[in-house]
Amino acid sequence: MAEPFDNDLDLHDSIEPSLAHRVVRRAAGVHFGAPTQVLPDDLDERASLHRAVHFASAANVDGEDAAESTASVGVAVSASAGADAPEGSTAQAAEGLVAGRPAATATSTYAAACELVAIALLDIAEYDQAVGSLTQVLPVVTAAYTQDGRDGWTQAIPQAAGSGSPLDAAEDKPRRRVNRAAVAAVVVVLALVAAVGAFFVLDGPGYIASMTAEVDEAAVSSVLEANTTLMAGFASNDYVAQTPYALSDVRIESADRQEDGSVTVDATAVLSNESFVSDCVLQLSFVHSSQLDRFPSIQGVEHAESPDGEWTGTLLSSTATTRAIAGVTVDPDFGDGFAPAFDEASQTCTFTASSGMELWFGAWSYATPYTYTFDGTAWTRAAGDATSTFAYNADAIAGSYAAGAGDSARLTSFKIVNFDTESGTFTLEYKATSTGFNPQAISGVISCAMSVSEGSEGSGDFSQADGYVYTFAGDGSSSAGDGAAHIEGVFGLDGELFFDFSGDYTKPAFLFGNPTNETMSISGTVSKAG
């Protein structure tokens, strides 16, 4: 058997928890439901209870030891409780318990934990009952709330209404109940009135219209046509005459309503003028005109209204595939004769720029090919290799020439015939006379050919305006002497020819002797006659 306990603290710490849970009970607050269990308020009674529940039940002690234990427990309880213990007290309730070995859980730590649990359960029950009393619409009973709770601050447990309680009298009177349905109806009506008022004050109809209306092609066209940048076209006006653009084939591909109520529209359109056509891909943003104040950002950019005024929109982005439908028409480097050939399939134009230079005996022709290519945004020009050709003027060269300076007077006849412009050849028919006391006349024909060379420093006045020197030379026949003739010459300015001529002739004997074959030489200039 265990050692007897020396004081109340040891007994308190050794309470067997399971027994404590059963015997530490007190009924309270029957009005609010099941009884709540608390420790006894009387310290002597609590000490007696501690002694009684220290030992295990009589079922754990056999035979005489059980009876002896029961008697011992009874004596211990009676002595501690006092002779004047009231009937039915906790001391009497302990008579049914017997002494025995301490329970396995009879430790001070476990006992303290059990007591704390009991206190916590009490607090929870008190809280639930207090909340329940506050939430009753028409309570039947209630109790005063004080600051004298068991722990110094917890609300006291509501007590059951007794006889003579003011609440009993109140329960006898007819209860005045509130018609909850009427109250609810009034609240609903007031809420509806407030909602309708707010709906109109906050432009609810406009907002609903903005959320249900749809953007159409007319609204898209109106915004696009008002955009000056778009209507200026996607192609540069270089090499073409500027003409106004027109919008056509506007189609909405998609329209997505955003969280803020605006509508993002993806559309396509065709933009064209006399020179170009652009297939456009466009994105626009629209807001309902009634909600325009909610979108200050759209007022800071170029925007326009739909024809009916319902929508206000702006162009967000635009791209286009552009092609030329007509060729270039203007080039500041060329005059009135500018007329290039246009190939729409290759998006190119070709033009040959021609120029020339006139000389008195022929003309130069210069040709430079140009190709204009449209790259989707502008026409560009590229020059090819220039070519030049010189064409002799047979009519200007052929004919008779009159003697000029020098010995040219001795060349009594100088006539060019059969000038071939392709080969630059001609025939010279001449007549010449020798010098001396008895001059001799000769005639003949010389075949000549033209040649052209670049002017040099020593060419002097023989260079033409084009910078070239045009010469001729030829051999032929003479009617006398050894029968040969030769000429070299150069074309001068204004129809002049500078020449050196030599021709065979027969020189007669002077008084005595035989004639001899000689060569006469003539140098000078001749000019185209009439």
Image (cartoon, helix red, strand yellow):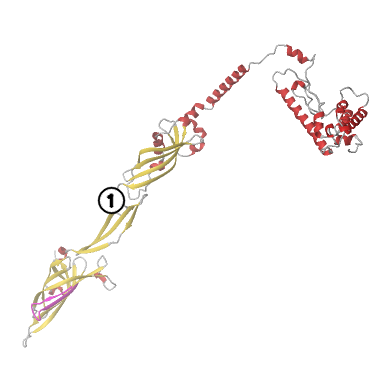
Q: Quadrant of the N terminus?
A: top right
Q: Tell me the residue at 28%/51% (across/down).
A: 343
Q: Which residue range is magenta in the image?
A: 473-489
Q: Position of residue 116 (x, y in %)?
A: 80, 34
Q: Position of residue 138 (x, y in %)?
A: 70, 18
Q: Secondary structure at mark 1?
A: strand
Q: Locate residue 179, reporting x and y percent.
A: 63, 16
In which quadrant is the C terminus drawn? bottom left
Which one is in front, 179 or 238?
Answer: 179
Figure disc tally: 1
Q: Residue furthest front?
A: 63
Residue 9 location, quadrant:
top right
Q: Residue furthest top?
A: 173
Q: Position of residue 479 (x, y in %)?
A: 8, 77
Amino acid at circle 1: Phe
Q: Is 414 left, or right, of 301 in this rendering?
A: left
454 to the left or right of 265: left
Q: Could you tell whether 316 is left or right of 18 in the image?
A: left
How crowded pointer 1 is (Cα within 10 Å; few <14, some 14-19, many 20+) is rated as: some
In this picture, residue 118 sits left or right of residue 512:
right
Q: Nearer the viewer, residue 393 or 144?
A: 144
Within the image, what quadrant is residue 45 found in? top right
Work out whether 325 lies above or below 456: above
Residue to which mark 1 is pinned: 342
Which quadrant of the structure image shows residue 177?
A: top right
Q: Is residue 38 above or below residue 480?
A: above
Magenta span main SS: strand
- Residue 475 in magenta stretch: yes
Q: As rendered, which of 371 and 392 lies closer to the eye?
A: 371
**Residue at (39, 45) in percent of width and height:** 320
Based on the picture, tell me whether residue 186 belongs to the magenta stretch: no
